[in-house]
Image (cartoon, rainbow, N blue to C red):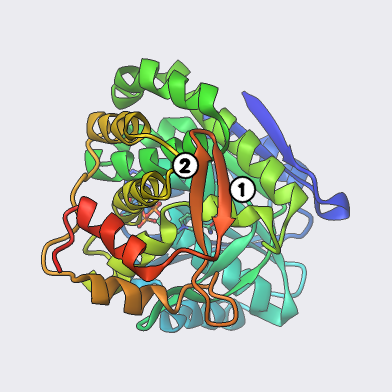
């Protein structure tokens, strides 16, 4: 078992990572203050893990469950309203705890509901996808999509506990597992070149879901994310580097229709676009682009942009990115492998050239 702390003063919290944690009753008892709990999950995860989790919560007075429909297309305000309905119908008080059991979609919506219900109640993340264990459950970004932009409605709201049971990753589909690897690879690219090299050396073990490789990678990613979030919780500066590849990726998700391209798949091709742009700016050489594309390919992630999306489609969707300031597009680019920075002076023709390098037509 590994424990990483997100240091945020009185709002600090542990990320506990290990096999079989869903059955560890004492972890829940130690971190949950109230007597009421609402477990929010979906109809894919519930049959796999809900009973096991409920077994560990047996000592609490009132444990309710809510099963939401599965999928990014349901990451909406309407779905969050169903969480409020359940909380009110079951008379949950201000000292209730909302517990997210699932991937990033369930985690983002449950956290947003926790931020809003009675102006804020306790929140626990039990992430069950690789993406959620290395990224979305940590750091307190919560929210939903809007038809005009990804994650545009939301709040910063930290959990009291993140409990990542690595055994749950055994049931994840190959496609969802690969999508999670995109965010794992992101950490190496933006701020940890030795980790990138470790990933190159161990990608086969990760793809085989070797428990030691998964545990090492998840802990390393959580340490990186915890450090960045502790320094800049509300993204006034450095935290933006965690969005490497996301400005391009969010454009793909929004234009293609949420759920058509998985978030991690869109981030993978978005990272390639960002490294191509960094190469065009003269900051990195072709070898870095090739190392990234080789690693993405070994992780079974896409290397070519979706068909039928033009550079105008990208630029229009990217204009509603949360990093836009004063009408200026801000992108996360690379100074070198393992060193990302925020750029706000990239000329549009250069962005278009980078898109073309990744297969975007006209
Ligand atoms: P997801 O939540 O849709 O989960 C992927 C699929 O796996 C779903 O069908 C889910 O039901 C299923 N699933 C979950 N756990 C499983 C298990 N153990 N076994 C079998 N199937 C399982 O997607 P995701 O990749 O976890 O998360 C993507 C979302 O996370 C996006 O909405 C993205 O915007 C968000 N995100 C948020 C942050 C943040 O900081 N809050 C960071 C990155 C991504
Ligand atoms: N996934 C980006 C962030 O948490 O800041």
Q: Which residue is mark 2?
A: 283
Mark toward the viewer: 2 or 1: 2
Observer-nearest of 108 and 362: 362
Residue 140 image position (x, y, % from top left): 64, 59
Where residue 217 is drawn, which disc sits there? none
Q: Quadrant of the C terminus?
A: bottom left
Observer-nearest of 19 and 306: 306
Query: Quick check: 275 left or right of 242?
Result: left
Q: Assess mark 2: CB under 8 A from ligand 2?
A: no
**Mark 1 element type:** loop
Query: Quick check: 164 left or right of 119?
Result: left
- 10 Å neighbourhood of mark 2: few (<14), some, or many (≥20)? some
Q: Which residue is mark 1?
A: 57
Residue 269 image position (x, y, % from top left): 29, 50
* Residue 154 against residue 58 in the figure, above or below: below
Residue 301 image position (x, y, % from top left): 24, 41
First in sequence: mark 2 or mark 1?
Answer: 1
* Residue 61 against residue 156 in the figure, above or below: above
Q: Quadrant of the N terminus?
A: top right
Query: Quick check: 237 left or right of 277?
Result: right
Observer-nearest of 81 and 331: 331
What whole-number distance in Å separates the C-alpha atoms at marks 2 and 1? Answer: 52 Å
């Amino acid at each position: 078992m590994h424990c990483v702390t997100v240091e945020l003063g009185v709002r600090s919290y542990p990320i506990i990572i290990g096999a079989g944690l869903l059955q560890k009753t004492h972890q829940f008892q130690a971190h949950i203050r109230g007597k009421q709990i609402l477990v929010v999950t979906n109809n894919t995860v519930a049959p796999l893990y809900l009973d096991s989790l409920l077994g560990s919560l047996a000592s609490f007075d009132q444990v309710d469950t809510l099963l939401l429909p599965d999928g990014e297309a349901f990451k909406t305000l309407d779905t969050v309203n169903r969480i409020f309905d359940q909380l009110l119908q079951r008379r949950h008080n201000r000292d209730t705890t909302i517990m997210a059991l699932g991937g990033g979609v369930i985690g983002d919506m449950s956290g947003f509901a926790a931020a809003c219900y009675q102006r804020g109640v306790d929140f626990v993340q039990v992430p069950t996808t690789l993406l959620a264990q290395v990224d979305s459950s940590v750091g307190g970004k919560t929210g939903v999509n809007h038809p005009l932009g990804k994650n545009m409605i939301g709040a910063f709201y930290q959990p009291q506990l993140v409990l990542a049971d690595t055994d749950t990753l055994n049931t994840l589909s190959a496609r969802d597992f690969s999508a999670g690897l995109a965010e794992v690879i992101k950490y190496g690219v933006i701020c940890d070149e030795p980790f990138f090299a470790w990933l190159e050396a161990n990608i086969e073990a990760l793809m085989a879901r070797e428990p030691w490789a998964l545990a090492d990678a998840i802990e390393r990613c959580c340490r990186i994310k915890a450090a960045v979030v502790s320094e800049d919780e509300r993204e006034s500066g450095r935290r933006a580097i965690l969005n490497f590849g996301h400005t391009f990726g969010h454009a793909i998700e929004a234009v293609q229709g949420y759920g058509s391209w998985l978030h991690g798949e869109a981030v993978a091709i978005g990272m390639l676009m960002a490294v191509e742009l960094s190469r065009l700016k003269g900051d990195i050489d072709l070898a870095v682009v090739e190392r990234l594309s080789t690693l993405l390919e070994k992780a079974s992630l896409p290397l070519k942009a979706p068909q039928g999306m033009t550079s105008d489609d990208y630029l229009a969707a990217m204009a509603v990115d949360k990093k836009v300031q004063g009408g200026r597009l801000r992108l996360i680019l690379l100074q070198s492998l393992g060193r990302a920075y925020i750029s706000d002076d990239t000329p549009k023709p250069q962005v278009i050239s980078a898109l073309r390098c990744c297969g975007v037509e006209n």
